[in-house]
Structure formats: structure tokens, C-alpha cells
């Protein structure tokens, strides 16, 4: 059997010649030719470089066949620069031909300090890795056999069969490593392709998102334009929604209560002590059980009920603040006539309310109505002050112009809200429930003594109204006249059994 390329092939000996007997000593240095075997003149030294098909330089330490010494790492006798004739030496990846180094002690992974091992995440074929490891273990076993043979001086030369087997195994490892490199290149190409695909998809999504944002902005601008147009159209026709009324009424009720609590603290007399019979009648109309309610409730809340009754009668109960009494009577007569002479039953309240709303909108913009409205505000302010301040004892000072200057803006706001009430196509009523049985659907307790007592007040008589209820009949177009909407619940004081 011919020896593998690059290995020493011992010359054929004549018949009768016997090699050194097993166990015989090696002839070490001192001989000609740098330490050759006896009877082998001209033979090349065993420490020549092994030429692998991959042309790897041999620099790996191992057993030196010329010296007979074991220079493997296990023996501890590896001199600096010694060479091994048993196989290839480190290549570009730290092992012959660029493939990974043999496994470490125990066959579990590379030895410490191994370089150039490809990242494990690219080895996606577990079978190749397992076979590679198995081949390395076989090579390690063969090298161990050679070391044992050399240590025991069982042979004096390299066994060609072992060399061929080692060469075959190393070639198989080189082939497996080549396959791994190809797989790594394919994986890298696939990763590059996926990265480019992701970048392309991200760019398309970004363009689509920008396009959608532009569409949303356009739609939002269109919606704002439509909303503004509807607001202008409603304002021109005097149409106001329920939410606006709730906000305005809540604000007005709070301001009115603050004014009473600030300027009416000194009003401590009972109505019977007032000499003016007219004032006594007005207080009695507003709060029939004045003395009884002041004993069980806050006196300021009772005083607020007196003030709101005057405002209700002088502003909210008017057909249109600013018209003279004769003009108001004429307008009411026309509305009654339209209702009575309607050709259908029930009457077309939507058309009648539309006529009233347009008429009020026209009248409130005229100078006579505006001037008369200012006069009505001053008259209402004077009556409020004369009634509530008459309950202040003579030894106490009455509020001056400060109270009037604070009350007039509140009354002007009440007139504005009243004009909006009359200018709607739906009918809006402002109701004081004094003398009615408490109904939590459109009333709420104003005493503030306890929370959530509305249900407990069922069946009780309403003795005073701190702020009236606002009820709408029909919708914004004036249709569905039987539809009732509670815009604002009345704030009331009830007569209890203990009063």
C-alpha cells in the first residue's frame, strides 16, 4: 500500500534484513544528518513538513519520531518551535486548512485559547456538528495510540495505515467545515435579503402612514368647517342647544347665591316686622312659610328664594323683556289666535313656535326693545334691594352702591338667557314648584344639610324655590311637541314634619 503524499515511505529492505527489534532504543542526536535511524543512510528526517492537499504549514507540536521524545502538550516536553509530522498545523481559523480546532479534554468543545471558531448561531445543521465532533474524537484517539506506541518504543517508524486513516479523517473534517462555511454564507445572504425586505416594508408603511395622516387632517379641517357653519347657521336662527343652557343657568345660579350670601347677611328680621304691606305680600308670595323654613334651613337660602321669585316674575315670566305691556299682550294674542285657528288637530306647534322665535329674534335687535330692557333691569334691581334690605334691622347699615353694581350684570345676563328661551322653536318654560309635591325627576334639595336625600323628600310639600326649573317641550326644530326635556332641575326647600 503506497504511503500518503507527504509522508515518509521507508525504503524496501533486502531479504533477510530485519528492522530494529521492538523495544530497541532510538539513536538520538550526534549522528550524521541530524539524527537518523541506524542502517538508514540518506533517509530524510521524520520531522519534515507534511504536505496536505490544502497546503497547510506544519507548526503543531507533537511527537518527534527522530528524537523519540514525546512533545505533545500532555507530556510537558514540547520545546519551542518543535514540529509534528502527524498532520497539518493551524490555518486561517486556528486549525489546519481553516477548519475548527479539535475538541478539548473529554471531547466537549474546543480547547482553551482556540481561535477562529465560527459563531454557533450559523450552524443550523446539528447532524454536521455532531459528525464533526465524532471525527475529531477519532483523530484524538489515533494520536493517543501513537503517543502510547512511542512511549513504549513499540515501533521505530510511522505506521502508514495510521497516517492514511488520520489523513482521511482530517479530509472529512475539512469537507464538513466547507459545508458549514457554505451554510453560513447562505444564511448571511438570507439575512441580508430579509433586512432589505424589512427596510422596504418599513418605507412603504411610513409612506402609507403619512398619507393617512394627511387624509385625517383634511377630514378634520372639513369637520371643523362644517361645525363652524352649523354654529353660525344656528346663531343666525337663534338656535341654542341644551348644554349651553345648562352651563349658563348653573353659572347664573351660583353667582346669584354668592350675591345673596355676601350682601344679605344683615337681613335678620321677620316679614311681619316690616311696615310696608307690599313688601310683606311679595315675601309671602315667594316664601309662604318664611318663618317656618328659616328655623330648619339656612336663612340665606330662604332669602335667595325671595330674590329668585322677583327675577322670575320680572324677567323669565315675561313674553319678551323690553316690550311694553300692550305689545306683549298683542303678541300673546296672535299666538293664541294661531293656535285656535289651526287647520289640523293638534295644532302645528312647530310652525307656531317658529313664528314666535323669528318674531322675538327681530324684536330683540331693535333699539326700543334694547332701551326698555335696560330700564327693566334697573327696576328689577331696585325691587330686589327694597325687599331683601327691608329685613335688615334699623341699627344695622344697609349695603350701598356696591351691591347694586354687582347685581345689575347678573340681571342683564338673566335677560339675555330669557331672550334665548323665547327665541327657540321648542317651547321652554321656567317653573317655580312652590306649593307642589316634591318630584326628584325635575327637583332637587337645596338645603345642603344631607347628601342624596332626594328620594327621602318624596311626598313632601315644596315650601320655597331657591332657583326655578327649566323644562323644554319639543325638539330644536319645534317638532315632537309632546317630548319633555328637563334642562335644569329646580333647587327647592321642602316642609318637613318637624318644622
Image (tube, rainbow, N blue to C red):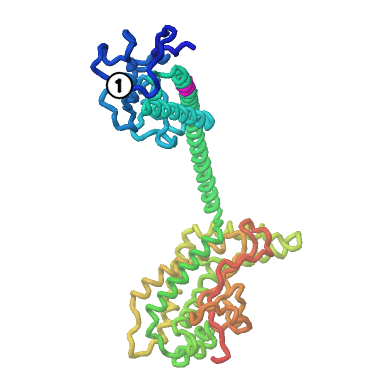
- Residue 274 falls in image quadrant: bottom left
Decide: is 419 above or below 25: below
Query: Residue at image x 51%, y 50%?
Result: 232
Q: Is residue 484 left or right of residue 228?
A: right
Q: Is residue 421 left or right of residue 109?
A: right
Query: Residue at image x 29%, y 28%?
Result: 78
Residue 109, can we see it? Answer: yes
- Viewer-proximal residue, 108 or 379? 108
Residue 101 image position (x, y, % from top left): 40, 28
Residue 341 image position (x, y, % from top left): 73, 62
Image: magenta residue range: 168-173
Badge 1 crowding class, 10 Å Cα cut-off, few under 14, some 14 to 19, many 20 or more, is some
Query: Going by the picture, which residue comes out furthest to the left?
Result: 30
Query: Residue at image x 55%, y 92%?
Result: 498
Q: Is residue 231 magenta?
A: no
- Residue 396 falls in image quadrant: bottom left
Query: Residue at image x 25%, y 25%?
Result: 80
What secondary structure is the stretch in magenta mostly built from?
helix
Please, what secondary structure does the residue beneath circle 1 have? loop
Q: Is residue 155 left or right of residue 485?
A: left
Decide: is 403 above or below 100: below
Residue 72 image position (x, y, % from top left): 34, 28
The residue singled out by tag 1 in the image is 67
Query: Going by the picture, which residue comes out furthest to the front?
Result: 16
Residue 192, can we see it? Answer: no
Amino acid at each position: 500500500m503506497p504511503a500518503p503524499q507527504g509522508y515518509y515511505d521507508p525504503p524496501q529492505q533486502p531479504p533477510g534484513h530485519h528492522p530494529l527489534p521492538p523495544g530497541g532504543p532510538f539513536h538520538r542526536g550526534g549522528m550524521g544528518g541530524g539524527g537518523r535511524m541506524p542502517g538508514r543512510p540518506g533517509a530524510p528526517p521524520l520531522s519534515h513538513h507534511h504536505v496536505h492537499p490544502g497546503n497547510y504549514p506544519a507548526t503543531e507540536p507533537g511527537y518527534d519520531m527522530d528524537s523519540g521524545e514525546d512533545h505533545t502538550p500532555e507530556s510537558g516536553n514540547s520545546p519551542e518551535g518543535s514540529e509534528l509530522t502527524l498532520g497539518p498545523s493551524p490555518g486561517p481559523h486556528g486549525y489546519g486548512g481553516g477548519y475548527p480546532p479539535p475538541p478539548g479534554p473529554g471531547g466537549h468543545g474546543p480547547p482553551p485559547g482556540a481561535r477562529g471558531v465560527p459563531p454557533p448561531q450559523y450552524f443550523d445543521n446539528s447532524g454536521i456538528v455532531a459528525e464533526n465532533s465524532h471525527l475529531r474524537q477519532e483523530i484524538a484517539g489515533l494520536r493517543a495510540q501513537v503517543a502510547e506506541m512511542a512511549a513504549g518504543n513499540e515501533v521505530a517508524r510511522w505506521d502508514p495505515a495510521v497516517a492514511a486513516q488520520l489523513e482521511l479523517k482530517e479530509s472529512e473534517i475539512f469537507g464538513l467545515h466547507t459545508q458549514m462555511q457554505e451554510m453560513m454564507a447562505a444564511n448571511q445572504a438570507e439575512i441580508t435579503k430579509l433586512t432589505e425586505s424589512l427596510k422596504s416594508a418599513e418605507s412603504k408603511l411610513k409612506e402609507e402612514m403619512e398619507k393617512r395622516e394627511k387624509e385625517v387632517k383634511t377630514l378634520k379641517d372639513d369637520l371643523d368647517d362644517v361645525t363652524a357653519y352649523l354654529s353660525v347657521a344656528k346663531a343666525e336662527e337663534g338656535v341654542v342647544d341644551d348644554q349651553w343652557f345648562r352651563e349658563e343657568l348653573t353659572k347664573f345660579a351660583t353667582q346669584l347665591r354668592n350675591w345673596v350670601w355676601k350682601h344679605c347677611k344683615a337681613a335678620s328680621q321677620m316679614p311681619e316686622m316690616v311696615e310696608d304691606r307690599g313688601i310683606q305680600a311679595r315675601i309671602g308670595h315667594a316664601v309662604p312659610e318664611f318663618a317656618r323654613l328659616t328655623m330648619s334651613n339656612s336663612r340665606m337660602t330662604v332669602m335667595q328664594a325671595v330674590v329668585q321669585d322677583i327675577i322670575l316674575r320680572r324677567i323669565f315670566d315675561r313674553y319678551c323683556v323690553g316690550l311694553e305691556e300692550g305689545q306683549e299682550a298683542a303678541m300673546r294674542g296672535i299666538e293664541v289666535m294661531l293656535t285656535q285657528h289651526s287647520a289640523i288637530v293638534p295644532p302645528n306647534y312647530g310652525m307656531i313656535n317658529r313664528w314666535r322665535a323669528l318674531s322675538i329674534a327681530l324684536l330683540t335687535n331693535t333699539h326700543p326693545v334694547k332701551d326698555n330692557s335696560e330700564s327693566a333691569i334697573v327696576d328689577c334691581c331696585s325691587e330686589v334691594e327694597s325687599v331683601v334690605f327691608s329685613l335688615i334691622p334699623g341699627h344695622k347699615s344697609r349695603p350701598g352702591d356696591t351691591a347694586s353694581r354687582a347685581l345689575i350684570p347678573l340681571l342683564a345676563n338673566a335677560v339675555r338667557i330669557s331672550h334665548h328661551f323665547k327665541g327657540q322653536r321648542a317651547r321652554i318654560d321656567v317653573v317655580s314648584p312652590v306649593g307642589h309635591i316634591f318630584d326628584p325627576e325635575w327637583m332637587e334639595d337645596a338645603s345642603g344639610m344631607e347628601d342624596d336625600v332626594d328620594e327621602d323628600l318624596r311626598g313632601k310639600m315644596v315650601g320655597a324655590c331657591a332657583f326655578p326649573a327649566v323644562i323644554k317641550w319639543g325638539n330644536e326644530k319645534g317638532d315632537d311637541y309632546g317630548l319633555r326635556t328637563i334642562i335644569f332641575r329646580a333647587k327647592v326647600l321642602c316642609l318637613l314634619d318637624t318644622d
